Amino acid sequence: MRHVSLMSATGLAAALLASPLAGEATLQKLSGSQIRAKLAGFEFTDEIHFREFYERSGRLTSTSMGRKRTGKWHVEKDQFCVEFDKEPPTKCYEVWASGKKVELRGDGVLPLQGVVELPGRK
């Protein structure tokens, strides 16, 4: 009998770990003040392809696939807006986050997923 209970518990644990939701925190949509607190002074990166630094002054520095760009960022109507120099127009995104994990969600585009971290951490 004890063997059957152990097998059931092991099976349940394996099913939970295999679940797509296991270990994933639920992302929450951020308000304007939460967006500033989450991104200002931090880097947003997928840790492989891109790294963007959002200075507290509103300046933006980006490195993506070896290409460096600069621009500016601001928060407007609970959206995070960026405009790269020589690449208008401004693009705005909803920001969804849980812990260090962040998604930038815009109309008609796939979410940009990554993490936020202190500048210079690789």
Image (tube, rainbow, N blue to C red):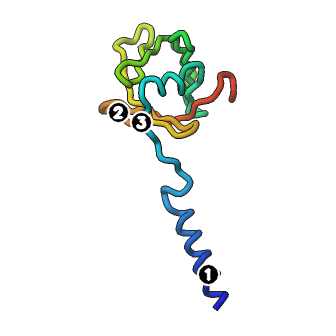
Residue 100: x %, y % from top left = 58, 36
Classify 10 Å Cα crowding around label 1: few (below 14), some (14-19), many (20 and above). Answer: few
Instruction: Choose mark 3 or mark 1, whichever is in front.
Output: 3
Q: Residue at x 49, y 37 (%)?
A: 97
User: Mark 3 touching mark 1, by CB under 8 A?
Assistant: no
Label 2 vs 3, first from the N-terminus: 3
> Which residue is disc 2 drawn over?
109
**What amino acid is at disc 1?**
Met
Residue 61 quadrant: top right
Amino acid type at image mark 3 = Lys
Which sits earlier in the primary sequence, circle 2 or circle 1?
Answer: 1
Residue 28 drawn above or below residue 10: above
When the figure is inspected, residue 40 is found, relative to residue 49, above or below; the finding is: above
Q: Which residue is mark 1?
A: 7
> Which mark, by number, is residue 97?
none
Residue on which the image places disc 3 = 29
Where's residue 120, x and y in %? 68, 22
Q: Are marks 2 and 1 in contact (CB under 8 Å)?
A: no
How far from the left and from the top, in percent, is residue 36? 50, 22
Q: CA distance from mark 2 to mark 1?
A: 45 Å
* Numbered disc in front, either 2 or 1: 1
Horizontally, is 90 left or right of 98 in the view?
left
Give the tally of numbered discs. 3
* Residue 53 coordinates in the image, percent (x, y): 57, 19
Extreme-left residue of the structure: 108
Q: Secondary structure at mark 3?
A: strand
Quadrant of the frame with the N terminus: bottom right
* Mark 2 crowd level (few <14, some 14–19, many ≥20, 10 Å Cα): few
Name the kind of residue labelled 2 in the image: Val
